[in-house]
Amino acid sequence: MEIIQENKPLYILETFFNGKQECDFKKNLAAKEFMLDSGAFTFMNSKSNVKAEQIEEYLHNYCKYIKQSNISNFIEMDLDCIFGYEQVKSWRKQIEKETNKQVIPVWHKSRGIEDYKKTLKEYNYIAIGGFAIKEIKQKEFDNIRKMVRFAFLNGKKIHALGYSRKDILTYNFYSVDSASWKIQAALGGMLYKFSDNTIKIINVKKDGYKTDIKKLKCCNLKEIIKYQYYLDTK
């Protein structure tokens, strides 16, 4: 898919799971910052059984790429749900040892609030996961708001993984990422439109009307980039 060149993205997140070539391409497109995801979400949703030995080899290549490409912001392999948190912490140490840099830990609610506070003391930039898979329920969003506010007041940065809600500005997130513009185009025929300082979603797939998915994705991306420029001023 072609990226809109005349309206260059300010910030881009790419997963290492998509390969070095794609990561290099996206890194060069980012006007301000590039974030590298470990690919844990893709592994978690893989239909095949993933073994720890596979992750070890994958992480070594991940770290090698981070060093060679001088990546500043990169996310840990948060596969708590498959291998347990202790293994995730072991991989976290491995990544930091091989890169000689701090990774971005991903807090999940299963780790508890005390772990969140402890991680905030040790790291300046952490992510919160569980939005995309609805691990965090609607009734828990007020607690998330308080947690992010606490981090903000203590000079810490929070990234929301897979966050596509329209109330972004009511939180103190430093950054968010979302692929909903691509997914909804492919599965639901949804057209994104940046208007009145927000994203509006239009269903263009009605009554069996066929849409050009590739063009729809390109249109959505262009509108998301406009929204990104707007949010960057706030």
Image: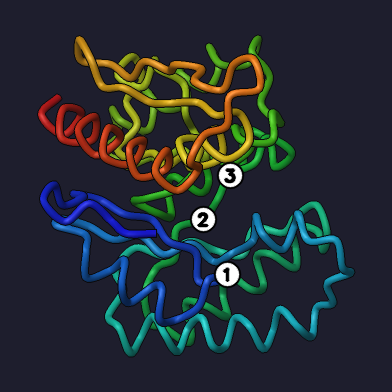
Above or below, comparing residue 164 to residue 20 in the picture: above
The reply to whether the C-beta atoms of the residues labelled 2 and 1 are less than 8 Å apart is yes
As drawn, the label of residue 92 is 1
As drawn, the label of residue 170 is none
- Circle 3 packing at 10 Å, graded few (<14), some (14-19), many (20+), is many
Above or below, comparing residue 109 to residue 146 in the picture: below
Of the pair 147 and 230, the residue shown nearer to us? 230
Can residue 35 be seen here? The reply is yes
Q: Amino acid at mark 3?
A: Trp
For numbered disc 2, what is the local secondary structure?
loop
The color scheme shown is rainbow
For numbered disc 3, what is the local secondary structure?
strand
For numbered disc 1, what is the local secondary structure?
helix
Q: Quadrant of residue 112?
A: top right
User: Residue 66 placed where, x, y %?
Assistant: 39, 80
Of the pair 194 and 17, the residue shown nearer to us? 194
The reply to whether the C-beta atoms of the residues labelled 2 and 3 are less than 8 Å apart is yes
Above or below, comparing residue 211 to residue 47 in the picture: above
Residue corresponding to mark 3: 107
User: Residue 4 placed where, x, y %?
Assistant: 22, 51
User: Residue 108 placed where, x, y %?
Assistant: 65, 41
Residue at (32, 25) in percent of width and height: 172
Q: CA distance from mark 3 to mark 1?
A: 13 Å
